[in-house]
Image (spheres, grey):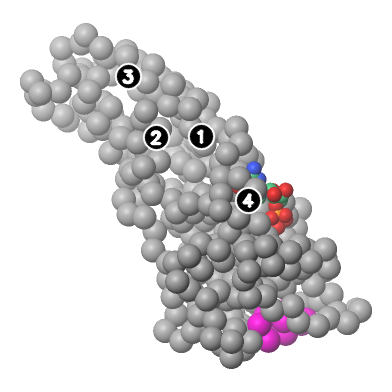
Amino acid sequence: MFENLSDKLQRSFKTLRGQGTITDDNIAEALREIRLALLESDVNLAVVTDLVEHIRTRALGTQVTTALSPSEQIVKIVHDELVNLLGKDTARFQKSSQPPSVILMAGLQGSGKTTTSGKLAQWLKKAGHRPMLVSVDVYRPAAREQLAIVARTISAQLYEGKLTDGEANTDSVLRLAKEAKREAASFGCDILIVDTAGRNQIDAALMDEMAALKKQLNPSEILFVADAMTGQDAVNSAKAFNDLLTITGAILTKMDGDARGGAALSIRHVTGAPIKFLGTGEKPDAFEPFHPDRIVSRIMG
Ligand code: GDP
């Protein structure tokens, strides 16, 4: 995770080694390299432009101190600006005043939504909650079966519901969701995780259905699940979902792959919503809360 970006940033800091102070001239080269390192790691262009400008302004405004060399100063500034970009705090989990709190999982097909629903349920169980899972993907029986398998694997409550043939429509999606919420309440489950139908691409039907689910369930969290391997596409679809649904957070999956990390650095800036968790493998426990400061430390090496 982030090794490539980390190496490239290290190289750009070296440009300032042996310099007495930070000047317009000697920082230009370092900033050029930082910009390139970020772009090559697939960070969104608008994010890179803003970030580099912040770094330049702060670097030039820094008092000459004897304690830190120019390269140490720039390392510190880049560190702080990356933390600002990702948000200072580890994101909190919103709950509703009346249980169950509903978590609506959104995302494209293949992003890891079902796997992540299970991971989240397991994480919440370990944190002392009683989550229930439901899949409202009435279009693909295999998707509902996949969630049933996940629920069995982690011994989590599941609402299966009943569907008859010809019920592949938004009405039955809403009916299943409503039944699941009632079932969760009567089972004493404090959280309902709703795995929704994905699509290959964002289309009006999907968005209408998500909006109807949001209206009916009044979720305390709408989490957008994004495949980190898809880089800028993940950021663009996060933006599209956010424009229509106002997501409360994002979960980046497949961070164990050779993703260049750009999506992780861009999503908050582009959507305003924090990254809340990372998926780091296929197993239920390959999942961790997103700590901006720890991620930045990893990037800074
Ligand atoms: P969905 O269509 O969005 O529900 O996606 P799935 O949950 O079915 O996941 C699609 C594929 O990605 C499956 O093969 C998962 O095992 C895999 N996957 C999900 N999350 C991760 C992850 O964090 N790391 C890795 N390596 N694979 C993952």
x 60%, y 55%: residue: 284
Residue 92 x %, y %: 39, 63
Q: CA distance from mark 2 to mark 1?
A: 8 Å
| Precedes in sequence: disc 4 or disc 1 | 1
Label 1 neighbourhood size at 10 Å, few (<14), some (14-19), many (20+)?
some
Question: Does the closest atom of ligand 1 sit within 8 Å of the Cβ of label 4?
Answer: no
Q: CA distance from mark 3 to mark 1?
A: 20 Å
Label 2 neighbourhood size at 10 Å, few (<14), some (14-19), many (20+)?
few
Query: Does 239 lie within the magenta span?
Result: no
Query: Callout 4, which amino acid?
Result: Lys
Q: Nearer the viewer, mark 4 or mark 3?
A: 4
Query: Callout 1, which amino acid?
Result: Met
Q: Which residue is mark 3?
A: 13
In the picture, the quarter occupied by the C terminus is: top left
* Element assignment for label 1: loop
Query: Does 177 lie within the magenta span?
Result: yes
285 left or right of 83 in image: right
Q: Which residue is mark 1?
A: 1
Q: Nearer the viewer, mark 2 or mark 4?
A: 4
Q: Main secondary structure of the magenta part?
A: helix
| Precedes in sequence: disc 2 or disc 1 | 1
Magenta highlight range: 171-180
Between 268 and 157, the residue placed more toward the observer is 157
| Precedes in sequence: disc 4 or disc 3 | 3
111 left or right of 76 in image: right
Query: Callout 2, which amino acid?
Result: Arg
Q: Which residue is mark 4?
A: 283
x 60%, y 32%: residue: 258
Q: Which residue is mark 2?
A: 298
| Precedes in sequence: disc 2 or disc 3 | 3
